[in-house]
Every structure is written in structure tokens, then in C-alpha cells.
Amino acid sequence: MPLVSMRQVLDEAAKGGYGVGAFNVNNMEQIQSIMEAARETQSPVIIQASRGARAYSQDRFLYHLMVAATELYPEIPTVLHLDHGNSPETCKTAIDMGFTSVMMDGSLMPDGKTPSTFEYNVEATKKVVEMAHAKGITVEGEIGCLGGIEDGHGAGVDGLAHLTDPDQAEEFVKQTGLDALAIAIGTSHGAYKFSKKPSGETLKMDVLIEIHRRLPNVHLVMHGSSSVPKELQDIINQYGGKLKPTFGVPVEEIQLGIKNGVRKINVDTDNRLAITGAIRKVFMEKPEEFDPRSYMKPARDAMKKVVAERMTQFGQAGHAKDYAPIPLSTIAQQYAAATVA
Ligand SMILES: [Zn+2]
């Protein structure tokens, strides 16, 4: 099947009461890891590329790898999503390339660093919604600012500096008509999220629950939601790495989020850790190896294991064949009809 609408995947997830992992990719091996995990667990899946990933791989390479994925895994509903688009122009280049979903992150100015105003955010997001929905493409927006920096994107602030205000979230959804909303509840991008296991003081699940109460039909998105498991940190450090101790978002908190309207969960760091640990292990144990496959293959297997585990924990496992994907042209007509009504 061709790449599918993220809106449809999230609507189905809402009906089934589960969440869908959105995993970042930069290269072929990461795409293969995710697709193998999706097949093994029979999961619909969201694969996303940031601006950094598009620059690293030249996104025509990424796009064609994704087309190959849909050909090789025809039974898996697969979304190609732009992570943290910094302007309507960037979103347009992704839509023109064939992405089936885009994030317009208007919580920051186009420099990807400076927190913006509410008015700017509404205007930029609305523009993308109009452009994307005309083609059946899904739009994710963000209100409040995530902590940290990843791929050069982020205000670099503490995760608690710009939490989402539920009043603003309500107004933002009303004014933009977007499909999915990323909210800031204390999480950060990157490996260093929390200095100890997060509590209600540092991870504001109560804010998430309040936003869901007010916006029960909006698909919520958790960013910076890697769990950063100690086992993966330990493997890196055991084989010569130097990671400082850190804590991610516990899976049980994500599961609580899923019970309260979270439908998309962004995971990148855990996969980076798994890949790096596997490669370091080969380098330390077999210093005579120089065939890239000797370490890329274990790296791919390690990432696949993490992704499959998350798919099971988020509840998307077993749901790949629940529904027939709707063509984007039909989705575009549905958006148009809803706007007229
Ligand atoms: Zn993010």
C-alpha cells in the first residue's frame, strides 16, 4: 500500500485506545529496523524525518527508501512525517516530496530556537493546515516549548520553562483546525531529560490530563519521550562510552498518557543509544573487523528490538490489519466537506 495519512492512523488508534510510536530515521538501516519491528509485531507505524535528517541524507534518498519500505512491507500502514518543520515553506517542501504528514512547529520562530508569540504560531500553523489538508496531508502543531535541543532544533530551555497552558491549547486548536497537538509537559529532547526518575513536579501529567479533558477529540503528541533505559546506557559505557547518568520518560507514564488522549509518541534517543551500544561492542570485542556490515547488522538488530518493545508497550502491536487505508485524495475531500459543514 502507498504511504498513508497520519490522521487516519491516529483516528484508528483513538478508536482502539492505543498509541503509535513515531520513530526518527536518517538512513536505510534505521528504516529497516522499524519496518522489521512493525512486521514482527503487526503494527501500523509512523516514520519521521527532522530537518537535520533531511539535510544529512538528502531527503530524496530518504523518500525513495520509504517508498521501498511500502513495497517490501505492503501489509503495514506506514506514515512518513516531517518532524519539527520550522516554517510553512519547509512544510511545503516535505509535502511536495511526498510526505503524508507534517509538523509545523510554530512554538519557535523559523530559526528553530526563539520562542514565538501565540499569534505567530496560529498564523503559521493555519497556513500549513490549509495547504496540507487540500492534499489530504495531516498536520501536527505545537503549543508551549519542549526542553532541550536536538538536531540544532529547540530553545535549549529547561523542560518546565514553557509548559502548555490548557486555555491556550483550546484556543489554538479552535483557530488552526490541526489534526494532532504536541504539548510541553516537562519533557526534553536529547538524552539528558531528567536528573532523577521524574515525579509529578518535573513531568506534568496533570497538565496533559487537563488538556485531554478539554479537547477529548484532539490527538495529543508526546515529544522527547524516550525512556533512556539504564541497560542501554550501561552497554555504551561498558564498551568505552562516557554517558553521564540520565533518566527518560518511564513507559508507565507514557501508558498513562495513552489512556488520556496521547496517540503519537516520539522516540529517537532510545534508538540512537541502541545503535551506538551495539557498534561500540563490536569495536571493542573485535578490533580486527573492518567490514561495516559486521557492526551495522548488530546495530540494526539492537534498534529493531527497542522499536518492537515500544510498539508492544504503546499498544499498536496487532493493529496493522484492522483497517483499509483511505487514499489521500478521499481524505482531502473529507477535510473539504468538514470545512464547508
Ligand atoms: Zn520533538
Image: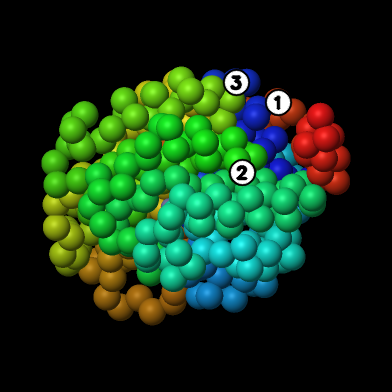
Q: Do the residues labelled 1 and 3 touch (CB within 8 Å)?
A: yes
Residue behind mark 1: 322
In front: mark 2 or mark 1?
2
Q: Distance between the residues labelled 2 and 1?
A: 30 Å
Check disc 1 and report its element: helix, strand or loop.
loop
Q: Contact (CB < 8 A) between labels 3 and 2?
A: no
How far across and how far down the image is residue 151, in percent? 40, 67
Residue matched to label 3: 16
Q: Nearer the viewer, residue 167 or 309?
A: 167
Foreground residue among 156 and 306: 156
Q: How crowded is mark 2: few (under 14 residues within 10 Å), some or many (20 or more)?
A: many
Q: In which quarter of the image is the N terminus?
A: top right
For badge 2, the amino acid type reads Thr
Instruction: Tell me what residue is drawn at x 14 percent, y 47 percent.
Output: 195
Which quadrant, please, contains the C terminus?
A: top right
Residue at position x 35%, y 76% in the image? 289
Q: Residue 280: percent from the left, percent from the top?
A: 28, 66
Under circle 3, the secondary element is: helix
Residue beneath disc 2: 176
